[in-house]
Amino acid sequence: MVAQNGHPEGQYLDLMRHILENGDERVDRTGVGTRSVFGATARFDLSDGTAPIITTKRVYWKTSIKEMLWFLKGGTNIQDLLRDNVRIWSDWPLATYRRETGEDIDQDAFERRIVEDDDFAARWGELGPVYGKQWRRWAGPDGQEHDQIAQLVTTLKDNPSSRRMLFHAWNVAELGEMALPPCHMVYQYHVTSDGRLNCLMFQRSVDVLLGLPFNLVGATALQMMLAQQADLLPGEFVWMAGDAHLYLNHLDQAREQLTREPRPFPKMRLVRRPDSIDGYRIDDFEVEGYDPHAAIKADVAV
């Protein structure tokens, strides 16, 4: 699917416009309120190295890939992210700290203490059994841990025609322990007869202004890593969502973004092949030709 003068980013902009014009306005968990539609799809062709990094505003793609690498390492504590200058998960533990201690600490001070004090980080930087835990250490009822990512890589190599090449994070028994239940919750893979790796990623819930651009980059980076490890080429990335929404304090920013004309998507490539899926680092990714419009600032709803 390609929209808006043939540019694949038009799919994103059309969704944003559809939410603004037709979304159901409702109270949500955060209390901010959303305008929401149910059911959305977009498709992106990655076969020539093109990456769906949104151009109608600047997307900090390195931050998104660092988050994905943190997931792959099984991370669940924000200390590692903060030491890598990634602050996108700080809001939830900070809100918990303020609520439970009554201390009105500012975000910078809280993050500094997480980085510098291991004991403080262990107590207040932990997000619970979020994505990384479920992807790499899913706990079965017998206590055995299941590494879904390692199993996926093995199946991609040994049985690429399988219809069971997927992983997910919606562990019902542990949802209550998570700072935030998984939004991008299911990834399924498909290998074509000519050796291309396709991905379908489903999100139960997506913040279209802030979250979706990051999710597109992260899923694309993961697809590239998996393809490389399995001696495949990237194919198509299919994105799907359940509740796709704009927060009510993001509507003006969305309208501003819709006034901008998309520019060509950049190319993304891997400059090194590590020995395993666990060996990637941010310097392995190179993006060329990214020329976005200016960033658009908006607050995260917690």
Image: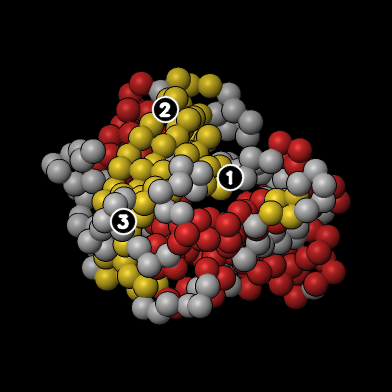
Cβ atoms under marks 2 and 1 closer than 8 Å: no
Q: Position of residue 296 (x, y in %)?
A: 39, 52
Closest to the observer, 186 or 90? 186
Q: Is residue 161 left or right of residue 195?
A: right
**Which residue occupies 62% across, 45% down?**
169
Find numbered disc 3 in the image and state the secondary structure of the residue it sits on.
strand
Res. 39 mark: 2
Closer to the chain start, of discs 2 and 1, is 2
Q: Is residue 16 left or right of residue 62?
A: left
Q: Quadrant of residue 69?
A: bottom right
92 vs 123: above or below: above
- Pointer 1: what residue? 168
Tag count: 3
Quarter of the figure that contains the N terminus = top left
**Which residue occupies 83% across, 60% down?**
123
**Which residue occupies 36% across, 78% down?**
271
Closer to the chain start, of discs 3 and 2, is 2
263 vs 18: above or below: below
- Pointer 3: what residue? 196
**Which residue occupies 80% across, 72% down?**
118
